Image (spheres, helix red, strand yellow):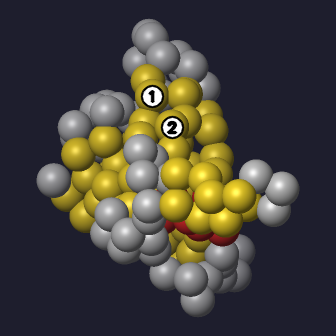
Amino acid sequence: MAAIASINGRQHGAFAAARTTLSSSDTITRDTRFKQILHLHNPTGGPLTLLIDGDGGTSVNAPGLGAVSVASGYSITVPAGEVRVVDLDTINAYTLGVVTLSGAATLVAQLFNF
């Protein structure tokens, strides 16, 4: 299990942005001081499904829906050869506590802080 390092996206001009190839289980650190963007690229010939699961999330109150469980995590499917990007603020309830990325070994990830 590797910790994915975040990249400072508040730099001027072009800058280096290291990529990390995911294993079967990796972690990210959620830092709410920044707008964090997770960039995911699938270099393989088949779809990969990533599960994002913070160990601090159980349920949240959603307007009009009441209590909604977030305990099983948030899945993102990345088709073969494609890219998906997620603003972690939009899935905040799934990223509480220690955040584990699992189920998509060989997916290439970058975590940007803006």
Asked whether residue 55 is in view, the answer is: yes
**Image point (45%, 71%), residue name:** 96
Q: Amino acid at mark 2?
A: Ser
- Whole-angstrom CA distance, mark 2 to mark 1, is 6 Å
Q: Could you say where residue 27 lies in the image, as x and y percent from the top left?
A: 30, 60
**Image point (76%, 52%), residue name:** 65
Secondary element at tag 1: strand
Q: Amino acid at mark 1?
A: Thr
Q: Could you say where residue 85 lies in the image, as x and y percent from the top left?
A: 64, 47
Q: Mark 2 and 1 residues: CB-CB less than 8 Å, in contact?
A: yes
Q: Quadrant of the C terminus?
A: bottom right
Q: Could you say where residue 106 lies in the image, as x and y percent from the top left?
A: 31, 31
Observer-nearest of 109 and 63: 63
Residue tagged by mark 2?
75
- Left or right of 11 in this view: 8: left
- Count all numbered tags in the image, as a single digit: 2
**Dot 2: within a 10 Å radius of its alpha carbon, few (fewer than 14), some, or many (20 or more) residues?**
some
Residue 13 falls in image quadrant = bottom right
Residue tagged by mark 1?
49
Observer-nearest of 50 and 22: 50
